[in-house]
Amino acid sequence: DPGHGGRDPGAIGDRGGEEKRIVLAAAFELKRRLEAARSCRVLLTRTRDVFVPLADRVDIARRREAALFVSLHADSAPGARGASVYTLSETASDSMSAALAQRENRADLAGGLRLPSVSPEVQRILISLMRQETQVGSNRLARLAVRELAEEVPLLPNSHREAAFVVLKSPEIPSALVELGFLSDPRDEAALQQPAHRARLSLALSRAVRQWLDSA
């Protein structure tokens, strides 16, 4: 899931690097690596510079009965540098994660998850049961991704964090949001615009995804 797109450029660095273009390039590279290894079939939520609402991104994964959902971003946060991985929690692990989620969720004010037409009580029970299992899978992916990314690129301290990102709210699909780096940091911006650096990120993430699938 390459974040942003179309009328929503995402973060823009001081040197003009656009998040929407950087993450799309990284997504194509990750897709190529996974398919070359015959690990899985890969579907991108967008393949060009178009706007896709947040809820639609989740729905695409749900309609295709995805085994895993990985959202790629390169956000902006004062003082932050390095890759990091986020899983869902309604209570953010720290103020920066809360701010990132709030910023991303504003990309689509109508964002949210479409749920079956059942009573609120049944809905809560179903979601709770599904999310317990799904969260285990999400956390396992996050641990693998952090470990593999650490072999290739600098990491943000406390590399696995939690926040209430809309795109992570599918109750049945293990999901993680990966910040490839921060365009607000000149070093990250310069690196993310280099194909060689994006290749290292994609290599690390492809290893993590393959390991996750092998142990699923």
Image (spheres, rainbow, N blue to C red):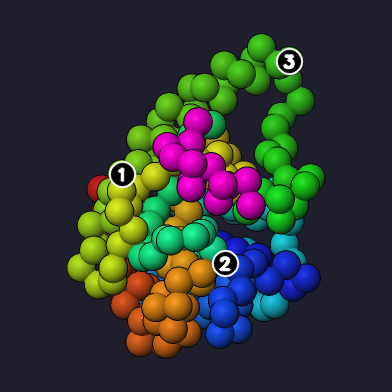
How far across and down, in percent of the image, does residue 18 sit? 60, 77
The residue labelled by disc 3 is 119
Quadrant of the rendering where the C terminus is positioned: top left
Counting residues from the start of the chain, the first of labels 1 and 2 encountered is 2
> Is residue 169 found left or right of 78 in the rendered image?
right
Pointers 3 and 2 in contact (C-beta within 8 Å): no
Residue drawn at x 35%, y 72% as measured from the top left: 201
Q: Which residue is mark 1?
A: 140
Q: Main secondary structure of the magenta part?
A: helix
| Label placed on residue 2 | 2
Mark whose residue sits in front, 3 or 2 = 2
Q: Give the SS element for disc 2.
A: loop
* Residue 47 placement, left or right of 187: right
- Closer-to-camera residue (29/164): 164
Q: Which residues are magenta?
A: 91-103
Q: Amino acid at mark 1?
A: Arg
